Image (spheres, rainbow, N blue to C red):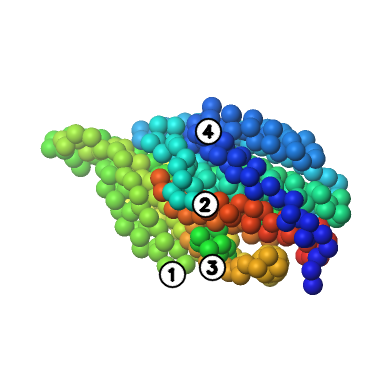
Amino acid sequence: MKPQNSDQIDARIDAGAMLDQVRSWCEINTGTANVDGLAKQAEVLAEAFSALPGEVELIDPAPVTAIAADGSEFEKAHGQHLVLRVRPTANRRILLTGHMDTVFPADHHFQKLTWLEEGVLNGPGVADMKGGIAVMLHALKAFEETASAGSLGYDVLLNSDEETGSLASADLIAKMARGKLAALTYEPAALPDGTLAHARGGTGNYSITFTGKSAHAGRNPHEGRNAIVAAADLILKLKGLEREDITINPAKLEGGGPNNVVPDHAVLRFNIRPKSTEAMEGFDKDLNGLLNVIEREHEISTHRHGGVTRPPKPVDEKAQKLFDLVRECGAELGHDIKWQSTGGVCDGNNIAACGVPVVDTMGVRGGSIHSADEFLITDSLAERAALSARVIERLSQGALN
Ligand SMILES: [Zn+2]
């Protein structure tokens, strides 16, 4: 069964314009901490997305704090997020998300675009995910020309902090996901052949500050309360909590001082990867219990900062229907779309946590992301835009109702 209009949809996608946009967007450095670069990018993207109906808005980032090595809390600067709302009163509404930041800071050596061979472009963000933003934009432009466009409303969110966990946009993501029929996120495909990411585990980052009591290591060590020892004890106890459905990675221990002083200060950083909601919730309780034990046994105090930033993303029945729809649309284009589970995380985790079905790897085909070898298979720009345009058209025609 071929949906109406879809042949014209593919013909409307301008591959050359897509590539030009990706190249110009990747010329702007948008490391997550580069607030000036992100402001430039937001301006250019606002201009590009003004080709769609609706009003583009730039939304201030939510305040985010982190813990310094000395235990003090400080605020981290972030860029603004771009939001576009189209036909907000439509009954059927979907969410499309992407991120404009990259993992490459302004002083990183990887800043330029290079052709690796014909059709394979190397550059910062070409796949993750400025290419994906172009896929989203051109899919929507093509969709707007279809007869059923009027029956679907959509919100677009391009955040500026995905690569560091979306702490400054998590509330915005949740707010925009609410009430949506489905969501599409434009991370690059899980494999260069176009394979999608299916279920995802979750992730959480913690900083625990330990405050003990300093004393002379020779004269009165018994009067001291060693923060480093307490932190080391917690590290071993944390590893003891690992199960099949959760791994814990103590990553960095800071603190201490001269050899002749009992250290009264330490900060421990660690990451968790829960595979299920139960594992995520269970860990939270276990951690509080462990901190109580550590405080009692070592006679020190602790402070806990951070938590789960990306809940696990299981694929439920509703989400599976969306995957099936993407596969169907792919088949119409002659592509055999597969999927596989992954340990990676993205904004799709946050969207799924709101109960909204999401396919989060609708972006380009490419690979070696988060490295200076990052590449984009340029043919995939138009190919994936055609795929998305079909999926969106089918959603507008009630495919998930
Ligand atoms: Zn990404």
Q: Where's residue 146, x and y in %?
A: 83, 53
Q: Where's residue 262, x and y in %?
A: 22, 38
* Residue 340 tag number: 3
Residue furthest out toward the front: 118
Q: Work out how far the residue at label 3 is from the one at label 4, CA to CA, in angstroms.
A: 32 Å
Which SS class for mark 2?
loop
The yes-or-no answer for disc 2 within 8 Å of ligand 1 is: no
Q: Where's residue 268, x and y in %?
A: 36, 45
Left or right position of 147 against 166: right
Which SS class for mark 1?
loop
Q: Quadrant of residue 263?
A: top left
Q: Which residue is mark 1?
A: 244
Amino acid type assigned to the residue bearing label 4 in the image: Ile
Of the residues under marks 4 and 2, which one precedes in the sequence? Answer: 4
Of the residues under marks 1 and 2, which one precedes in the sequence? Answer: 2
Query: Is residue 39 or residue 280 the one in the foreground?
Result: 39
Q: Which residue is mark 2?
A: 119
- Residues under numbered marks 1 and 2 in contact, where contact means CB atoms less than 8 Å apart: no
Amino acid type assigned to the residue bearing label 3 in the image: Gln
